[in-house]
Structure formats: structure tokens, C-alpha cells
Image: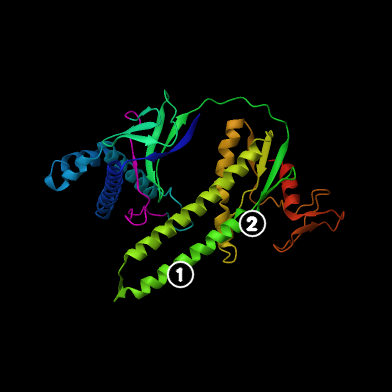
Amino acid sequence: MIRAKKVRLRPTKEQEKQLWKSSGTARWIFNWTLKMQEMNHRFDGKFIANNHLRKYITKIKKRPKYAWLNDVSNNIAKQAVKDACDAYKKWFDGRTGRSCLKAEKPRLKSRKKTKPAFYNDNIKLKVKAKSVLLEKIGWIKTSEQIPKNTKYFNPRVRFDGKYWYLSMGIEKEKSEQHLTGEVLGIDLGIKDLAVVSNGRIYKNINKTKKVKKIEKRLRRLQRTVSRKYEMNKEGNRFVKTCNIYKLEKEIRHTHRRLANIRQNHIHQTTTEIVKTKPSKIVIETLNVKGMMKNKHLAKSVAQQKFYEFKRQLQYKCEDYGIELVEADTFYPSSKLCHECGYKKVELKLSDRTYHCEECGYTADRDYNASLNLASYIA
């Protein structure tokens, strides 16, 4: 099986300049490819295969105007063309984010908003003691050792707003695990991230003092930079000063820190659940799009990252050989009584305790739902 590996790079100043140049080239080629496909589509032309566009890029590199494309590896441009063509074809075939009305069209990458990233050829990627060789950049030090003598899949170099990282897929052997035979039901929510049928409750990290303190600081920084924008406004445009650039950098780092805290909490939670080694785990299928329409809950739902929780649980269950089952969308796990099976007609969001009118069973609403999920039969 293939598993992802992400390692922080420690480039020198000269190497960092080359990293920025490589990511800028990848962004420019991606945007150029989308514009070519869009122009062709307007004049009723057929989809342009990425091989034709690659050959055209090889020709324009010979022109003095585009000589700067030769400063980086040619594989960066080739992969950027392929990525753009794949994105455009998916939209053309209606396979990207299709809603009831239309599919989302691929957008041009912005220099200010898009995270810098580029591809490195997996065959030319070389590894030695705490170092990695990237094309036309050289040997770059890494914060930890990358596994040697293995095949690498789809290596990508990315900048997360503070550091450069190399991520890739690595072949890994599947180890046999002795499972307990237990069936776990997991109820996801906003009050708590996850309530498990074995009695474990995993807190909502966004309600902790640490996260609230960082969010409070983020709000203050955003208000400060907003005032500075207004102070330096000239007509219809904003003039950025050195202080504004400093504040924007601090805001980016604060967003990054919050994202890492949430991601780490989900990793710890899913790992702890899987390490109990049950034979089967049942989770509910949430209508996240519907939940996001509620203006009072939208922010809380987005911060919980339910899809990321499910994604991590899927691949970790696969590593351990655990069966992961998703309950039907309309399965009323919260409305059913675990003791007698009685179904409530109506259950408000404010009702945090489940009380059965038939048998008198009383339990926490989320815990009752997790028990119902554990006994779910597909």
C-alpha cells in the first residue's frame, strides 16, 4: 500500500530563491494552459491534449522572451500542463463539484492567494542522510530522514506560509493486527468532536482556552490591518505599507497555527480510536452542506472538519484491517431508543438528553446515538 510522507525542507537563501522561481513557473504554466483551453473552447474547438501543449512549450522556450522557463526543471512545466488539462477535462465532463445546476470551473492561480507548489520527478529524486536532491536546485537538508531504497510517488514541494515541505507517496507493507471483535459506533457533533460507544468522549478543540486565545489575537490583528487599509487608501486603491505587510504575515502565521492545532487533534483522536483495534467501526453520514446553510452553526461545523476526520479514519482502518461502515444518510441514530427501539417523532437540537417515553430510558443524546450506530446493520 502507498502512504504519504511529509518532510520539512531546510534550504539556504539561494536554494529558497530557486524554490520560489520553480513554484512561480508552475503557477504561470498552469494559468497559461487554462487560458489556451478556454480560448479553444470559445471557438468551438475540441479539448487540447496535454501532449500538444507540452510540445508547444518546448518550442516557446527557445524564444528570448520565454528564456526564463529554462531556469527550472522541464518536468515542472510538463506536470503543470497535465494538472491544468486534468482539471479542465473534469470540469468539461461535469465531474468537479457538481451541484444541482452546474459544475465548478477551474480557476486561475493567484500569486497572492494560491499556496506555492511544484512537482519534482520521482525518478530523479535522490535521498541520502537527512538530505534530498531536487532538480536544478541541488541537495537540500531535511528535518528528518526520508526512507531510502523505495519507490516514490508524485513528489510535490509546497510552501505553507512559513516553511517549505516535500510530500510524496511511499510504498509500505501492510502488517497483520489482532482485532478484539468489538463494534464501535462514533457520533460526530459540535458540542464534542466524537462520542464513541465504548464511553470515550473526544472534546471539541475549538472550545479550549488555547484556541480561543489564538482566535482572539487573530481578530485583533485583522481589525488592526483593516484600519491601516482605510488610513492608507488613495481613491479606489489601497497602498500597502511595511507595517501592513508585517501584519499580513502575522495573520498568515496565526491561521497556519490554528489549522495545525485542529489537524493534530483529529490525528490524535482517530489514531486513539483505531488503536483500540475493534473489528468494525460505524460512523454516521452527515449532510455537511445542509448544516453549513445554518448561519448560526456554519462556522462551528467548518472548524470541526468532519470530512477530514472521516478521511483519516478510512486510511487508518485500512492499515489495521478494520471494517469501516457508513450508516445510511437517513438512519435516525439520534431519534432511536437504544433499549426498546422506539423512535421519537421530533428531537430538537437543544435536547441534549435523550428520554424515551415508552421504556423510560434516559441517556446523553450523543452517547445514545453512538450505541445505535454500533448496532447498525447495513
Please state the horizontal and vertical placement of residue 113, each as a whole percent of the image.
37, 56
**Outermost residue to the top:** 149
In the image: residue 311, left or right of residue 17: right
Q: Residue 70: give its label.
A: none
Q: Residue at x 37, y 74 (%)?
A: 230
Mark 2 or mark 1, earlier in chain: 2
In the image: residue 285, left or right of residue 47: right
In reply to whether residue 333 is colored magenta, the answer given is no
Rendered position, 251 above or below 78: below
Nearer to us of marks 2 and 1 is 1
Q: Residue at x 67, y 39 (%)?
A: 281
Instruction: Name the kind of residue labelled 2 in the image.
Output: Ile
Tell me the CA gap for discs 2 and 1.
27 Å
What's drawn in magenta, residue-wise? 104-124
Task: Look at the numbered disc 1 and give the secondary structure of its residue.
Answer: helix
Q: Toward the viewer: 338 or 220?
A: 220
Q: Residue 190: give its label.
A: 2
The image quadrant of residue 318 is top right
Q: Residue at x 47, y 57 (%)?
A: 254
Please state the horizontal and vertical placement of residue 266, each as a whole percent of the image.
58, 46
The image quadrant of residue 67 is top left
Please state the horizontal and vertical placement of residue 343, each as a whole percent of the image.
78, 55
Instruction: Name the kind of residue labelled 1 in the image.
Output: Arg
Main SS, magenta residues: loop
Residue placed under numbered mark 1 in the picture:
223
Q: Toward the viewer: 227 or 272?
A: 227
- Tell me the quadrant of the picture where the C terminus can be found: top right
**Outermost residue to the right:** 359
